[in-house]
Image (spheres, grey):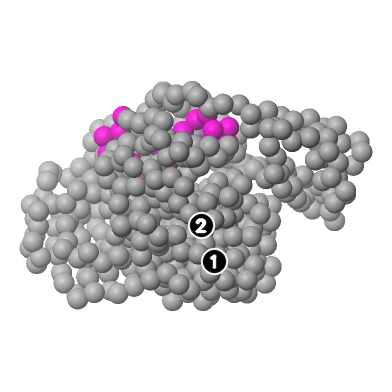
Amino acid sequence: IILEYVEGGESKTRSIDLLDLRPDTDITALVEEIQKGEPLITTSCLEHVIHLVQRLQEKLGEKQNHKFSLFKVLRTHILPLTNVAFNKSGSRFITGSYDRTCKLWDTASGEELRSLEGHRNVVYAIAFNNPYGDKIATGSFDKTCKVWSTETGQCYHTFRGHSAEIVCLSFNPQSTLLATGSMDTTAKLWDLEKGEEVATLNGHSAEIISLSFNTTGDRIITGSFDHTVGVWDVGTGRLLHTLIGHRGEISSAQFNWDCSLIVTGSMDKTCMLWNAVTGTHIATLAGHSKEVLDVCFDYTGQRIATASADGSARVYNAGTKQCIAKLEGHEDEISKVCFNPKGNCILTASSDKTARLWDAATGHCLQILEGHADEIFSCAFNYKGDTIITETSGSCSGKRKILEALARLHLSQCSLFLGWFGPCQMLSTMDSSNYRRLFEKRLRNALIQPLHAAPNSQAAMQEPNELALTVKVQFVKRVIEFYINCDCCD
């Protein structure tokens, strides 16, 4: 439960932990116990809180046996998508794209409500300021972040300061700060009211590709290509802990709900569990045969799900550290995994062009969600858990736009590969480094089929172009830069 109150003229929020709520819990006794330590719950609002918790208890007792069916396919972006996000109610969602826009949609009707335009490059990282949902943040390869009004589409702020692409961002729970992570190896905190930079989080030696606040908003974690995760004090910007132990790039990192644990996934094929307070390593959750591409907690923080390039997902008990279910059935790698709000179902998105629903307790596949013609790289439940959105890089919609691009890949041995590729094709290389794979999975443009090109050769152009992109992709050890300059041709 989130309580809103005013202190010193400022609107603030406080969260109440209901992780022990069960279908047979005595609600009155539970709320009275919470009231003893929470002065915001006064006698006048006690009945309202009891009613609210009763509603939550009823939801816990409901059995989820309905099937999901495809009801909308949305095609308006002229270039592939990068990310998707629901607002808390699930009534609206946003999509980011390589076409340099973010679009706001009505979930029920599938109607495009507005297009947020102003970035000069790929819009990669997007988010609502949930639970409020009145603001949208967009992070771009143009090195800026913009904050928009959900209702009017007005741009409140444009945050400048990063020297490389912004690839991740997050609002704090109170919606007073925005954090951005960049390929320049730093994260920054921004004041949403003043529109100013609050702090720069320096400490990583390579690109930051994941960041997340805890539920109280006083800590933030950053995952990096340097194989480590940083734990930072939000108030001071000070680095509290560096989580060292992975032997590969970090792909994902997340707090559990009560802020006691951190889970990290890595290209070293493992998932690690950490004490969020002390920064000490608790356990290594092994079992996957290829890179771990995504990790998440359920709402209680008692279970962990992992998604891997080996085509499987796993569920671990955070207490016993044991694998309790193996989710097997996908025919290609899984890039995204998430629990539904109740925690009894898991959703996975795969390069085999399907998403799947699984029973979180048994690992049994409940439903295969088909219909996409391209690899699915992202998926999400809405807050109620009754709507799912899946996202694919896809081909351009409407009048097909044929793109051509010149790619230069400078690998660690400085080998040069040349080739032409369209929006769903990319030059193949023989390099098998984790840098290339993580780049492919985290910067979605490489969910791609190979052209048959040899080193130091140039492949044929597919078709005449209508748009031209020049893409420079450099891999020099841990330094990865990705630029796209998109200009219309005559």
- The N terminus appears in which quarter of the rendering? top right
The reply, left or right, for residue 54 in relation to residue 341 is right
The type of residue carrying mark 1 is Ile
Judge whether 160 appears above or below 75 on screen. Answer: below
Report the residue at 80% width, 40% height from top. 30
Q: Position of residue 230 (x, y in %)?
A: 53, 70
Residue 403 colored magenta? Answer: no
Image: magenta residue range = 371-390
Q: Callout 2: 10 Å neighbours few (<14), some, many (20+)?
A: some
Report the residue at 40% width, 60% height from top. 286
Q: Which residue is mark 2?
A: 321
The type of residue carrying mark 2 is Lys
* Helix, strand or loop status at disc 1: strand
Tell me whether circle 1 and circle 2 mark residues in contact (CB < 8 Å).
Answer: yes
Residue 329 seen anywhere in this rendered image of the structure: yes
Q: Which residue is mark 1?
A: 282
Residue 182 seen anywhere in this rendered image of the structure: no
Report the residue at 66% width, 54% height from top. 258
Q: Which of disc 2 and disc 1 is earlier in sequence?
A: 1
Report the residue at 19% width, 75% height from top. 414
Q: CA distance from mark 1 to mark 2?
A: 9 Å
Q: Position of residue 400 (x, y in %)?
A: 23, 36
The image quarter in which residue 196 lies: bottom right
Q: Position of residue 13 (x, y in %)?
A: 75, 49
The image quarter in which residue 408 lies: bottom left
* Helix, strand or loop status at disc 2: loop
